Amino acid sequence: MRAGEESGDRADADRASTRWPARLHVITGKGGTGKTTVAAALALALASGGRRTLLVEVESRQGIAQLFGTDPLPYEERSIATARGGGEVRALAVDSEEALLEYLDMFYKLGAAGRALRKLGAIDFATTIAPGLRDVLLTGKVKEATTRTADKRRVYDAVVLDAPPTGRIGRFLNVTAETARLAKVGPIKTQSEGVAALLRSPMTAVHVVTLLEEMPVQETIDAIGDLNGLRIPVGRLILNATRPPLLAGKITQAELRRGLAAAGLPTDRTTVAGLHAEARDQLVRRDLEESLRADLVELGLPLVELPLLAEGVDRTGLDLIADTLLATD
Amino acid sequence: MRPDHPAPELDIDQILADPGVRIVVCCGSGGVGKTTTAAALALRAAERHGRRTVVLTIDPARRLAQSLGLNELDNTPRQVKGIDVETSGGELHAMMLDMKRTFDDVVLAHTDPAKAAEIFANPFYQAMSSTFAGTQEYMAMEKLGQLHARGEWDLIVVDTPPSRSALDFLDAPARLSRFLDGRMLRLLLAPARSGGRSMFSLVTASFGMFSRVVQKVLGAQLLTDLSGFVAALDSMFGGFRQRAEQTYRVLQARETAFLLVAVPEPDAVREAAYFAGRLGQERMPLAGLVLNRVHRPAVERPTAAESLAAAERLVELGGHEATVETLLAHAALTQQAARERRVARVFTDAFPAVPTVAVTAQPADVHDVDGLRTIGAAISRR
Ligand SMILES: Nc1ncnc2c1ncn2[C@@H]1O[C@H](COP(=O)(O)OP(=O)(O)OP(=O)(O)O)[C@@H](O)[C@H]1O
Ligand SMILES: Nc1ncnc2c1ncn2[C@@H]1O[C@H](COP(=O)(O)OP(=O)(O)OP(=O)(O)O)[C@@H](O)[C@H]1O
Ligand SMILES: [Mg+2]
Ligand SMILES: [Mg+2]
């Protein structure tokens, strides 16, 4: 490797840790705004320069496997991609049943009885009847990975969590309150207190992904209110799939007719009126987007803008988003 | 040129005007426009077709709720004022589903006040009535059943909960009632009872172990609460299942019309296709597909290629900046429309007989009665 490249890698690693200082990055946002995409791109970005990151999903949807085009992920940390400069992204799909069995095994030897319970649906039952219990198990696993060390070094430079959507994020992260309702004593309670402490520390940052559309922006504002109320630190607002405005300003029909004539295009009334109406709609849209952007800016959080990828999200697109995330100040 | 839709065109006015149609259910994956469509159709049924209509909305956007006069969540329909029903003589009533309150009402209807109070105080009931995945779907069904039983309306338009998968609306109620009905609860309540047959011996042994583990990990109080919950609900198990089954049958009847809502994106269209398949299996009547938020250029010519070439010529000539931008925007819109048509074809190819209508994306969100009228008119292609 040439010297220049090496120092480039170091620069990447430095940028990753100064611009995204937390160790645990929680990505939320309204459904469909790009949480999984952004989480994957951030895991790639933070792995650049020879670092190692873990990308975690918790909703049993295999969104990561779909995105990277791999077989469904097991409940096991697997290498899923390499980043620039020899970095590595590993992925994990946390399954609440597996997490419960693993957890119980730490305290009791269940063996065959554990499997029998599972077959019967008892584990599913236990995690379904008490959603708070499920969330503690999921966040507990994330905490374990975030703080895990080997040879006195952290195993992961950063952990990125593809989290539940804005509507459920407050409840998901507010683990102590949810378990306190059900478990008043015991190891689960202790575990939830550990998770709560991590989530409220500077080691964690929750980033909210949104689009320039009314409902996602409204949900973003609501979620930030919820998180502030829970004293969980909010990191950045991530404005996904943005497009540069196509039109600078108004155009009159007369102007348009002259332009079309100069270009040698038909200037009949239907064509002129049609194109004029399209331009007008574009401007309405642009004004709306401007006002939504202003609402977001008012929240006073650092804002990152990611471009709309016209061809959809493939590996090249993910790398492009990763670079944008790293280049952010 | 290929027509927009090789599929037959959906005639929504015929459905809304048909006195034999008493229920319209709007389904689809998250964020596609179910609530907007439901409200727009209910408004149209009242204004144009003179029907006494009620719309059951679920989590409507705040501003839409306000413009329907839904400021309070009292779980009963309220008449919407200030709409244009003078000539038609119709009425529009609207309500927002309150999931917890609907659950409470079911409990109250099945048991005496003392027992109900005990259930309401149980932490498991509290967790379940507000957070159980599927409770919202179940309660939407329950509320539909109640509205239908009252027989007060010519037409009930139902919105469905914002779940990822449209199928949840059909599956979640059954899952919940199976769960409430379930062997699991009974086992947990009285493991000894099911130990009769030998097959169960390992199960029962594990179960005793399970309760011991649960006791240690979660504390004994939790099991007591859980048993209390199960015991208190015991008398209602049959009721839950029966009601869900009843509503399910109503959904299969000829008086019901399902409308699928989708946007021209791969995930939404795939979901719509799954759902259409499922409705067929369940023998539930699918009336059509509303392809919402589609983009269509106002004029077919110039084509995208012609627009781009013309824009290039103008740039060379100099001047005419605004026309250049307009042409580039037109080219982008035309290309997007073509992409969307390709995506939608996944559905129409799989279900060529399902009537379809495309609704253009409005430049801004829909949150007032005028906006709903525009959507209603677009769905009926008028
Ligand atoms: N910047 C972008 N440009 C183009 N397409 C994008 C962009 N970001 C996301 N998408 C696409 O949008 C869709 C939704 O993205 P994604 O799955 O990441 O969202 P999500 O928030 O995780 O959704 P869900 O709530 O369903 O989990 C996907 O098809 C994805 O490829
Ligand atoms: N044809 C349309 N043009 C422009 N905006 C639309 C159109 N249809 C719906 N919308 C807007 O899209 C957003 C989502 O619509 P709506 O709330 O009806 O979807 P939904 O399917 O009910 O969503 P959820 O699954 O979250 O309940 C709303 O802000 C609505 O105003
Ligand atoms: Mg996702
Ligand atoms: Mg809705």
Image (cartoon, coloured by chain):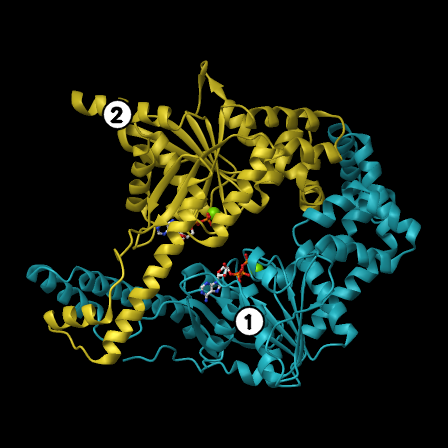
Chain colours: A yellow, B cyan
Work out whether B234 lies above or below A321. below
- Residue A211 appears anywhere in the view: no
Q: How many numbered discs?
A: 2
At x 50%, y 68%, the residue is B371
Q: Is residue B350 left or right of residue A257?
A: right
Residue A63, image x, y percentages = 46, 47
Residue matched to label 2: A9
At x 45%, y 30%, the residue is A159
> Please, what secondary structure does the residue beneath circle 2 have?
helix
Query: Quarter holding the N terminus of chain B?
Result: bottom left
Residue matched to label 1: B40
Amino acid under label 1? Answer: Ala
- Residue B33 appears anywhere in the view: yes
Amino acid under label 2? Answer: Asp
At x 32%, y 33%, the residue is A326
The one nearer the camera, B56 or B275, is B56
Residue B214, image x, y percentages = 75, 33
Residue B223, image x, y percentages = 81, 37
> Please, what secondary structure does the residue beneath circle 1 have?
helix
